Image: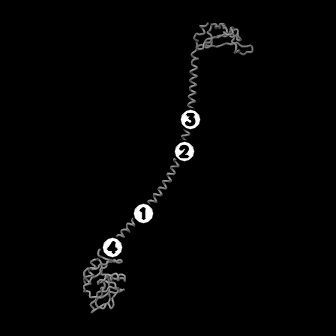
Amino acid sequence: MSEDIYATPDLSKKVRFQTGEKADGNADVYEIPDNVNIYDNYLPPQGSKPLELQDSTTEDPQKGTPLGNSKMSGVKAISVNVPSGGRNLLRPAAMFLLLLCLLFLAGVVVLVVLLIQDKGHNADLTRARDELQTSYGEMKSLNANLTQKTNQLEKEIYHLKVIESNLTTAIDELKQQQESSCCPDNWIRFGTSCYLISNSEKNWNESKSFCEEQNAQLVIISSEQEQNFISSFHRVFWIGLSNEAGTKVWKWVNGSVTVQTYWATDQPDYFEDSEHCAHIQYFSLYSWNDLNCICQEYFLCEKILE
């Protein structure tokens, strides 16, 4: 009997139980009737009598009573062989399922952490974007202000260039005026004119020609101040005043007729109708005198400044 228990079961066979019915017609699921038949492949082979299970009773090791005498005395013991390899596969399978659950839980935790970090990262990106937009707006406003100030500076620079050009022109004009207002060497300035005292004597016509060669003329006295200035030299000079023979009209070398005169007393006297040129003879305000034009006298040239 022990050999049948530890024998390798034939798993290709199928077992079908036939149970009896109670008096009420219901099958008794707790009691196995005595007429249990075991068939191979659902049906017994034809012409053969089904095997009957042998009655076997074992004693309860604790109580010392046979199992057949227990409460289920009507149940015949059936030996079922369960392979040990099947029991050994359950534990690794359970461990594998547990490991999968742990991995899944860890993946969920990682995803939650990543989502939280991603939300924080997105918040930082949004904050950084807002700061960049604010900075861009400030820089745009600053650029506009700088452009406006640059335009203003360019206008001011243009005005300064215009002023500089005008100043340069004015300086050039002042230089020209200064050059033209300066008297040549050995000439004396008074007012707007330069005067040259001759160092030799000539007649009136020769004196007039000499002054013209110096781009000047025999002096023309046009004011009392100029008359006093010339008299202060205490010299006898030809002046640029004359008249034609037979007339008493005195004219300056530029052709203008005298308006204000400074003749000395009883002058001009037209001595023997030969004195047609004027000179300064006395050292006072009224010092003009008529004289013969061929006389040799010093003379005074005048150059009018521009």
Number of the front mark, 2 or 4 = 4
State the image coordinates of residue 275 (x, y, percent, origin top left): 28, 89
The answer for how far apart the CA atoms under marks 4 and 3 are is: 98 Å
Q: Amino acid at mark 1?
A: Leu
Q: Which residue is mark 3?
A: 113
The answer for how far apart the CA atoms under marks 1 and 3 are is: 68 Å
Residue at 28% in and 88% down? 291
State the image coordinates of residue 41 (x, y, percent, origin top left): 61, 13
Q: State the quadrant of the N terminus.
A: top right
Question: SS for tag 4?
Answer: loop
Q: Amino acid at mark 3?
A: Val
Q: Nearer the viewer, residue 120 or 41?
A: 120
Q: Residues within 10 Å of mark 4 (few under 14, many from 20)?
A: some
Number of the front mark, 1 or 3 = 1
Name which quarter of the figure residue 184 lies in: bottom left
Number of the front mark, 4 or 3 = 4
Up-down relation of residue 39 to residue 252 (above or below): above
Q: Which mark is residue 160?
A: 1
Labelled pair 2, 4 in contact (Cβ < 8 Å): no
Q: Is residue 304 left or right of residue 122?
A: left
Q: Which residue is mark 2?
A: 127
Question: SS for tag 3?
Answer: helix
Name which quarter of the figure residue 153 lies in: bottom left
Q: Which residue is mark 4?
A: 182
Labelled pair 2, 3 in contact (Cβ < 8 Å): no
Q: Is residue 214 left or right of residue 31?
A: left
